[in-house]
Image (cartoon, helix red, strand yellow):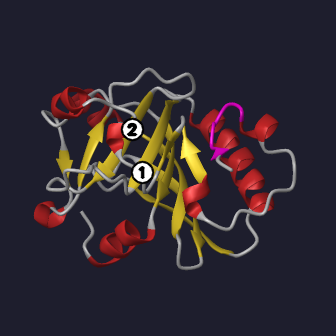
Amino acid sequence: MKIFLLVLALILNLQSLINADDIGDFEIDGIGINTSLLEYLSQSEINLALKNPTYYKNNEFVVIFINKLSQTYDRLQVTFKPNDNTYKIYSIDGVLDFDRNIEKCLEQKKTIIDDLEVMFKDFERIDEDSPFAPDKSGKSKSFGSWFFLKNKGYISINCVEMGDTIRELNGWTDELSISVTNKELEDFLRGNPY
């Protein structure tokens, strides 16, 4: 059974007491990890998205925004290995804009966390507020929470309050993101951050 992590509908969809055992049971906007991106997009749509990618260290993984209309999120992005012709998905992220409304973002984040705590029976939760790393001015803040499933990957919920410099430079806005990441990418990120 797939459990949809829909930010706006999370409360309604997850009222029952579900004990999730496998990160692969979760989807964001109908897209699950450990599946092929080709199940959701054509090769030409993937090629188009690959014209504006972001690579992790050593180019082992690539992140792309997918041009798929979402009923729930403002943006979707997926992570896969650039040399993998099957396009196995290692992470899927849904992003909602909360421009200049970080308090509303933090309220939504708390609601999602409350629901996830009911769903999981075996996890380690870590919360960390820190400067937002891509903003070298130090004026942006990140408010993150991670649910690490024992040996299975993680789900993260993050609100970012953008500073004026990065907002003007890149056009970025305050946002909430939910990410479902498998164990292989988690292990890579622990040893090879951006």
Which quadrant holds the C terminus? bottom left
Residue position for label 2:
39
Amino acid of disc 2: Glu
Magenta residues (range):
3-9
Q: Position of residue 57 (x, y in %)?
A: 17, 64
In the picture, measured across the screen, residue 161 lies left or right of residue 88, that is right
Q: Position of residue 119 (x, y in %)?
A: 76, 59
Q: Residue at x 30, y 72 (%)?
A: 188
Magenta span dominant secondary structure: loop
Q: Residue at x 28, y 48 (%)?
A: 135
Q: 10 Å neighbourhood of mark 2: few (<14), some, or many (≥20)?
A: few
Asked which quadrant contains residue 29, the reply is top right
Vertical side of 29 occupied by 5: above or below: below
Q: Quadrant of residue 10?
A: top right
Is 83 magenta? The answer is: no
> Which element type, helix, strand or loop, lies under badge 1?
loop
Distance between the Cα atoms at labels 1 and 2? 8 Å
The quarter of the displayed image where residue 11 is located: top right
- Rendered position, 101 above or below 122: above
Q: Residue at x 25, y 73 (%)?
A: 192
Q: Is residue 46 left or right of residue 119?
A: left
With 78 as the anchor, is 194 left or right in this view?
left
Residue 145 seen in the current view: no
Residue 151 image position (x, y, % from top left): 53, 79
Q: Is residue 58 left or right of residue 72?
A: left
Residue assigned mark 1? 35
Contact check, label 1 and label 2, Cβ < 8 Å: yes
Question: Dot 1 surroundings within 10 Å: few (below 14), some, or many (20 or more)?
Answer: some
What amino acid is at disc 1?
Thr
